[in-house]
Amino acid sequence: MYDYQQKYAEYLQTFESYLHTYAENLKTVPPILGEAMRYSLLSGGKRIRPVLMLATAEVLGVEQELVLPYATALEMIHTYSLIHDDLPAMDNDDFRRGKPSCHKAYGEAYAILAGDALLNQALSLVLEMALKGEKYTLAAKLLSDFAGMNGMILGQVADMQHTASGEAITEKTLHFIQENKTGKLLLAPLLIPSILADNRYYIRLEQFGKELGRLFQITDDILDVEGEFDQIGKSVGKDENSDKLTCVKLYGLQGAKLRADECLARCRALLEGIDCNTDFLENLVLSVRERKA
């Protein structure tokens, strides 16, 4: 019988082992920079992005050793984004994964610099992989593009601008923010293995990834209303208090849940078109819909 939780744990252990070995070298003089980097990078979490990359690599027949550096770079980028997102100038959150945010533990200036350092180290890592050949270079470029002005950062800016403007909510704006702020870093772990597998199932994985990213953000919006601090490890109710544009604000709580179910159905339909064993990906989508943290 297939055991999703056991398989997830196996992927997670593979990644954590690689990450901790890599993080041992993130030491600096003065040491406070490396300490702040490791504090946030090694603070735990579900690691859904690297797990998703390892699972997709297995589906497509790509060796783990080839995607682990990209998975590590992706997690460093994700971590830097969380450090900056928690800052008073952004979402002003005191907790992350049940621990004080980086700026609460090390101060704002060191938190900013730790985030900057993680981003640059991530790019250094994928550039090293790019020396292996063209498809590795294309994978590095995709990750860089998705993290920057055409991806996550663009989505963050759009979110902040809309919140500050007080403009009327539109579905188009919501989808734009979802696709970039959250979606691009959930799309990367699907498309990087595809690129390394000579673009196998690229279009279908791209469609699947967009739906998965939307589903993840919708459930995040729902958890901000229904979640509990002990489970999600961060403050709840901040979206409403900050007047953020969320799926719950646009459609209401029940409407958001309905749209999450629709995303789930579309994800499943897209996986049916992949002639490989996608059991893990199907279970992962369901776990995203049902997550409590």
Image (cartoon, rainbow, N blue to C red):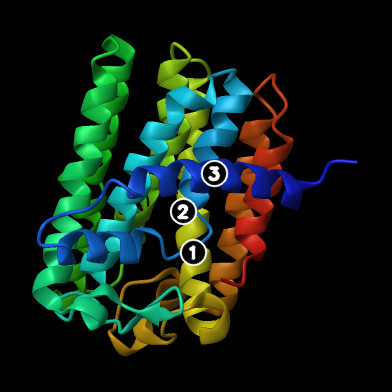
- Upstream in the sequence, badge 3 or badge 2? 3
Q: Determine whether 125 is above or below 17 in the image.
A: above
> Residue visible at 41% across and 85% down?
235
**Residue 134's spot in the image, x, y percent?**
27, 10
The image's mark for residue 214 is: 2
Q: Give the left or right position of residue 173, taking residue 254 as reference.
A: left
Task: Evaluate if marks 3 and 1 touch, with contact meaning CB atoms under 8 Å apart.
Answer: no
Q: Nearer the viewer, mark 3 or mark 1?
A: 3
Counting from the top left corner in percent of width and height, residue 111 is at 17, 69
- Labelled disc at residue 173: none
Q: As shown in the figure, which amino acid type bears the numbered disc 3?
A: Val
Residue 193: give x, y in percent of width and height.
46, 25
Residue drawn at point x = 46 percent, y = 40 percent = 18
**Disc 1 residue type (three-letter):** Ile
For the residue labelled by badge 3, is the local secondary structure a helix, a strand or a loop? helix
Q: Residue furthest right?
A: 1
Do tag 1 and tag 2 residues touch (Cβ < 8 Å)? yes
Query: Closer to the camera, 92 or 39?
Result: 39
Report the mark closest to the observer, 3 or 2. Answer: 3
> Does the CB distance between marks 3 and 2 fall below 8 Å?
no
| Residue 117 can be seen, yes or no | yes
Q: CA distance from mark 3 to mark 1?
A: 20 Å
Q: Which mark is drawn over residue 218?
A: 1
Q: Is residue 173 visible?
A: no
- Three-letter code, disc 2: Arg
- 82 is higher (above) or lower (below) than 146: below
